[in-house]
């Protein structure tokens, strides 16, 4: 399939936060003492995880299993319990510290030391362990500090055996190998230098929307779960962590299809929204004036706040970065404002109300809830007028469509 050209990347290259990958490398010139056989004529390593771990660990384990099959035409066994492993001399064991019986048992037995990564953000440790469990002679062990750390560790193996993160989107070729072995060096990944990294699907009308409608999701005629599944897989494989979904009026709003947010969570992808979508609400297609009245904070504050609160309640079980915003519909200024001081006062009230909604619904302190604010177009003028923004809110500095920040 041909890749669409309209996906825009947020601020940085998707790999910026993940400069170093696991020290698992192909044994090109014959294995050494740190070698591990994944597939040969006699053995196929099993992939093991804990079913009680985060959903993304299962997702990543299944992707690695599929990737090994792409390379060797051999499908490894997949086990979701340390008590269920049978017939495997070699294994790739992955789990999150504190959430995986496999990993916690290895820590308790002092088979692995994860002190360097424990409690970190998206970190993982790679170890080669002898006799990690009953019947298993040797294993690559991946211990994650959190759910994405574990998944990133698994995906780093996929990359090293020759499966590009872009294998599906770009038809990136995968070299076949009759046997597959890797050399493993003990490794502790670093905390990503950029905490939030991902994709914003923008101006999709003539790109991914048309492609999904006419090719990939004909049955829906729009961007939907099938498309978002492939986008989220790409994000995970790139060791990124965030998605701002398509938001033009022509697209079905992300939250109008309940399965979308479940798919994002299955890949541990954080959802955020653009500069004009407050608290995850796609105002372009989800604000219905015939039902809610005018999108005007001066004249319709109660209804605006109630709709925003409902969205936060719907999204609360999932991981999000909430946009604080007050703009008009369709990338315009909010209607009904007076002079600059009046506009500043209106926006100040709106942002304070949005933060209070987050506190009320999520039951956390405002400073503990990830939030972002983008002073784009007329909002920059309001910001420069003296808009007060708490220090815990991340400011996203955009350009002005002409290349100036």
Image (tube, rainbow, N blue to C red):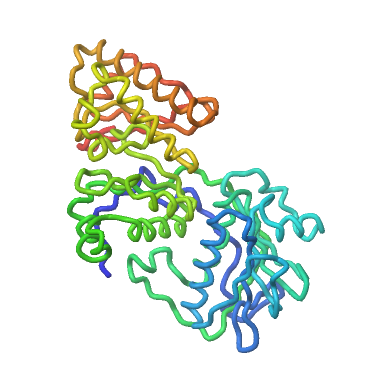
391 or 308: which is nearer to us? Answer: 308
Q: Quadrant of residue 42?
A: bottom right
Q: Is residue 14 left or right of residue 334?
A: right
Q: Residue 205's spot in the image, x, y percent?
A: 19, 51
301 or 354: which is nearer to us? Answer: 301
Q: Quadrant of the N terminus?
A: bottom left
43 or 193: which is nearer to us? Answer: 43
Q: Residue at x 60, y 76 (%)?
A: 77
Q: Residue 369's spot in the image, x, y percent?
A: 50, 31
Image vertical order of residue 41 relative to residue 357, above or below? below
Q: Residue 248's spot in the image, x, y percent?
A: 22, 44
222 or 290: which is nearer to us? Answer: 290
Query: Does residue 152 show up?
Result: no
Q: Residue at x 54, y 28 (%)?
A: 363
Q: Residue at x 64, y 58 (%)?
A: 95
Q: Residue farthest to the right?
A: 109
């Amino acid at each position: 399939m041909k890749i669409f050209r309209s996906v825009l990347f947020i601020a940085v290259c998707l790999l910026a936060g993940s400069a170093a990958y696991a020290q698992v490398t192909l044994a090109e010139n014959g294995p050494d003492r740190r070698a591990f056989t994944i597939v040969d004529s006699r053995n196929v390593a099993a992939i093991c995880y804990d079913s009680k771990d985060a959903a993304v660990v299962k997702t990543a384990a299944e992707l690695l299993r599929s990737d090994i099959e792409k390379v060797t035409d051999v499908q490894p066994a997949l086990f979701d319990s340390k008590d269920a492993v049978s017939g495997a001399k070699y294994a790739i064991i992955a789990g999150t510290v504190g959430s995986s019986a496999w990993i916690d048992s290895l820590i308790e037995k002092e088979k692995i030391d994860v002190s360097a990564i424990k409690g970190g953000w998206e970190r993982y440790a790679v170890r080669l362990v002898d006799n990690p469990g009953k019947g298993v002679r040797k294993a690559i062990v991946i211990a994650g500090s959190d759910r994405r750390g574990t998944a990133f560790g698994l995906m780093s193996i996929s990359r090293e055996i020759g499966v590009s993160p872009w294998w599906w989107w770009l038809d990136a070729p995968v070299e076949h190998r009759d046997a597959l072995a890797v050399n493993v060096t003990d490794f502790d990944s670093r905390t990503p230098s950029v905490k939030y990294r991902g994709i914003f699907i923008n101006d999709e009308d003539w790109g991914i929307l048309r492609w999904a409608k006419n090719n990939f999701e004909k049955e829906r005629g729009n961007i939907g779960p099938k498309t978002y599944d492939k986008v989220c897989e790409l994000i995970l494989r790139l060791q990124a962590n965030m998605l701002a979904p398509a938001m033009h009026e022509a697209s079905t709003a992300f939250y109008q299809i309940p399965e979308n947010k479940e798919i994002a969570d299955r890949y541990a992808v954080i959802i955020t929204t653009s500069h004009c979508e407050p608290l995850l609400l796609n105002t372009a297609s989800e604000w219905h004036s015939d039902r809610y009245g005018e999108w005007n904070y001066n004249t319709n504050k109660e209804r605006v706040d109630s709709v925003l609160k409902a969205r936060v309640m719907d999204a609360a079980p999932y991981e999000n970065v909430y946009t604080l915003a007050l703009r008009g519909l369709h990338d315009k200024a909010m209607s009904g404002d007076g002079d600059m001081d009046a506009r500043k006062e209106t926006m100040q009230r709106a942002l304070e109300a949005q933060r209070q909604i987050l506190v009320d619904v999520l039951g956390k302190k405002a400073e503990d809830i990830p939030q972002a604010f983008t002073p784009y177009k007329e909002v920059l003028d309001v910001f420069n007028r003296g808009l007060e923004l708490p220090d815990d809110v991340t400011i996203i500095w955009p350009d002005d469509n002409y290349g100036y920040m």
